Image (spheres, grey):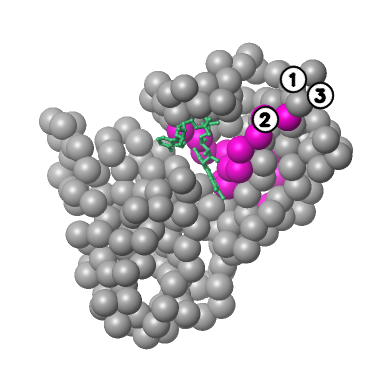
Amino acid sequence: MKALSPARLVDRALHGPDLATLHVAVDGGVPKFLPGQFVALGFLDDGRATVRPYSIASAPGGDAYELYVRRVEGGAVTPRLFAAPIGSELVVGRPKGRFIEPTGGRLVLIATGTGIAPFVSITRAHAQADDPRPIVILHGARHVGDLTYDAWLRAQIGAGRPWRYLPVVSRPDGSGWAGRTGYVQQHLAEIGPTHDDVFMICGARVMVDDVAERLRTMGVDPAKIHTEAWG
Ligand SMILES: Cc1cc2nc3c(=O)[nH]c(=O)nc-3n(C[C@H](O)[C@H](O)[C@H](O)COP(=O)(O)OP(=O)(O)OC[C@H]3O[C@@H](n4cnc5c(N)ncnc54)[C@H](O)[C@@H]3O)c2cc1C
């Protein structure tokens, strides 16, 4: 397939049985991309490609893409991405997508699960550029251990970035978690939306549609709500 380039799995860090960050190097180097974009990634078997879109979690300029992937039982691609030995050959498409940082005032990023991936790319790019734009990150995860970028975000804020980070855990299950519980939808008021804010929402379609609807009900201009829904 012409649109796909040979690539290689160079690293996989497991954050639980079904959650991993993957590092994927591309033959000829990682092309230019905008934070928020995604790539098609998968396998070539006897000339036949099986690929799925994955948001890029790394900032532009690295040696490999970082992707943040949940394993879907019975899926065509994710079980293989979790089982493939390091060094395995993959195929990857060119970066695509229009889910990129909108201009405006404060940037409010709302995600569940691996939907935080494009926001990790965006915030990493902000950190690299020492960008003064205020950002709010509202991230919902099932378990405390699924807040993969929690330590990095907290460290950035500790270092003085003008960001607010609002993690939410739906199943704290005796983990000792003393933070927000439930679903991101229950914590939108804490953002304290102002009319300068622009919103990006990413994750499962039911959550994305519900959050967008609630924001509109709270008086947010629909033109300032940008969404990317998976599945
Ligand atoms: C623009 C875009 C960006 C994406 N970025 C990411 C990302 O950064 N990280 C990531 O993990 N995923 C991401 N996805 C989802 C990803 O593309 C695949 O859909 C997912 O990894 C499942 O692929 P699969 O081949 O393993 O399963 P498939 O063979 O596609 O699906 C197997 C079965 O599982 C169902 N299914 C698919 N996904 C899920 C799910 N999440 N939960 C439960 N059932 C499911 C399908 O409907 C099907 O019945 C993104 C999707 C889009 C559209």
On screen, residue 175 versus residue 37, left or right, reads: left
Q: Left or right: 219 with respect to 153?
A: left
* Label 3 lies in ligand 1 vicinity (Cβ under 8 Å): no
Q: Are marks 3 and 1 in contact (CB under 8 Å)?
A: yes
Residues shaded magenta: 49-70
Q: How far across and how far down the image is residue 187, in percent?
A: 22, 61
Report the residue marked by disc 3. 47
Q: Give the SS element for disc 2.
A: strand
Q: Name the spot of residue 134 as percent of width and height, x first.
A: 44, 71
**Amino acid type at mark 2:** Thr
Image vertical order of residue 158 relative to residue 22, above or below: below
Task: Kindly report the distance in space between the C-alpha atoms of the residues bearing marks 3 and 1.
Answer: 5 Å
Residue denoted by label 1: 45
Q: CA distance from mark 2 to mark 1?
A: 8 Å
- When asked about the image quadrant of residue 141, the answer is top left
Q: Can you tell which mark lies on residue 35?
A: none
Q: Where residue 10 sits in the image (x, y, percent)?
A: 68, 25
Residue 170, image x and y in percent? Answer: 22, 43
Q: Are marks 2 and 1 in contact (CB under 8 Å)?
A: yes
Residue sitting nearer the eye, 106 or 231? 231
Residue under numbered circle 2: 50
